[in-house]
Amino acid sequence: MRSRPYHHGDLPAELLAHAEKMLREKGAYELSLRAIARDIGVSPAAPSRHFKNKQALLDTVALKGFERLAAATEDARRGAGVTFAERLVAAARAYLRFALANRALFDLMCQAYTGERTSPELCEVARRLPGQLVALVADGQSGGEVRTGAPERVALPVFAALHGYARLAVSGLVPAELTELGLEDVIESILRGCRP
Amino acid sequence: MRSRPYHHGDLPAELLAHAEKMLREKGAYELSLRAIARDIGVSPAAPSRHFKNKQALLDTVALKGFERLAAATEDARRGAGVTFAERLVAAARAYLRFALANRALFDLMCQAYTGERTSPELCEVARRLPGQLVALVADGQSGGEVRTGAPERVALPVFAALHGYARLAVSGLVPAELTELGLEDVIESILRGCRP
DNA sequence: ACCTGAACACCGTTCAAGT
DNA sequence: ACCTGAACACCGTTCAAGT
């Protein structure tokens, strides 16, 4: 039996995986680079070869989060019916489900949108989410299901309501037993706002 | 000229003031208890007499933020016209203005809603904001301007859209030159959703 | 190329001791 | 009652040196 190899198989991937696990189990405040390195069995200096600092690691975690979220909502929309309402409901449920199932990660993603320090890649993937809604709205318009107007401008209030509701739910401002009901109210309100 | 007195005039207040200043100038990530103590000219151990830990200080900063925000939106609503739409617009503008003028504080407040660790006082004051909207909606209902339904359920989508839009704007997902226009679209959408 | 070991400058928090 | 000084256990980051 040989001891731990000097070179790791894929340290970057393992760092990301452990960071996300720690985020889930301990929360963002407890997440430390040294603790991750310790868990993996690597020196405190090792991560710096792959991520220039802690923020860079977190940005990458957020990036992967956005990719998963975008994939989840896209899949949901594709798996839904053909009407605008059906597709919106499916995407909205997937968005909320992701937020609630990945609270700390969702928080990280939301503050990662923020600020000048954010990487271009992160910005780009973050914009896929409103982008999906814009496409959905444009589709709904061409079918006569959604009122006219620049799709971006019609979609923005939709995204604001959805995202805002997810934030409130994650924050605990909406009691857990009412999140489903509340989402229905939010969707109903959105659909009223979109009617031709 | 006598040297710095051993006892401070009002250390708790000065700690809070400096914490907020630091939040504004450096951001949440840079904010350290030791740096605040240094700035004030007090030992690193001094804050612990007044706040049991860093989180307790931040919670109090967030609490004061909620009070200021609630006061700002209440004032705006009172200073506005008598129709539901006028009052909603005034409150919404005040909410967005506060968020943009106090980005780091607003971020802190939003994550401070979160979680089990949050103090009861913080929860209570955080609920004043949706509470205002519930009252506004109830008023609008009695005047026949807003559709019927439990006021809490009608107000929730309104709050979600408003809060969500503020978050998007603070995050930089809405370009600065479009925030005003976007808010108008959001308000219009909300009003459509509220119509009888 | 990839990682270690040791070091540096910084944290938050605690606790005896001073005023 | 309020604060200091010193200590403790922890950080993130850097850099020569090892493999």
Image (spheres, coloured by chain):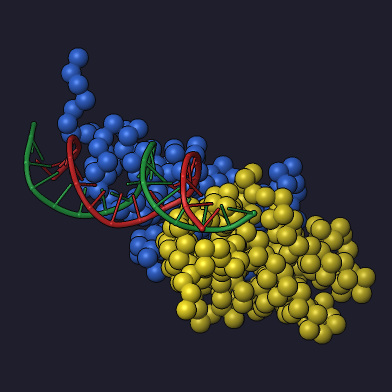
Chain colours: A yellow, B blue, C green, D red
Q: In which quadrant of the rendered view does residue B164 lie?
A: bottom right
Task: Say which residue appears at 79% left-offset and 67% top-offset.
Answer: A132
- Number of marks in the rendered image: 0
Instruction: Name the side, left or right, on which A180 lies relative to A88.
Output: left
Task: Say which residue appears at 28% left-offset and 50% top-offset.
Answer: B51
Q: Nearer the viewer, residue B180 or A163?
A: A163
In the displayed structure, B128 sits above or below B175; it is: below
- Quarter of the image for the N terminus of chain B: give it: top left
Instruction: Name the side, left or right, on which B150 lies relative to B109.
Output: right
Task: Say which residue appears at 52% left-offset and 47% top-offset.
Answer: B104
Q: Nearer the viewer, residue B45 or B159?
A: B45
Instruction: Name the side, left or right, on which A51 lies relative to A146.
Output: left
Task: Say which residue appears at 62% left-offset and 59% top-offset.
Answer: A60
In the displayed structure, C7 sits above or below A174; it is: above
**Residue A72 x %, y %:** 70, 75
**Residue B29 x %, y %:** 48, 47
User: In the current view of this chain or complex, which residue is farthest to the right?
Assistant: A142
User: In the current view of this chain or complex, which residue is farthest to the top?
Assistant: B1
- Quarter of the image for the C terminus of chain B: give it: bottom right
**Residue B90 x %, y %:** 62, 50
Q: Is residue B8 visible?
A: yes
In the displayed structure, A42 sits above or below D5; it is: below
Q: Is residue B126 visible?
A: no
**Residue A102 x %, y %:** 56, 72
Q: Nearer the viewer, residue B193 or B26?
A: B26
Q: Nearer the viewer, residue B122 or A117?
A: A117
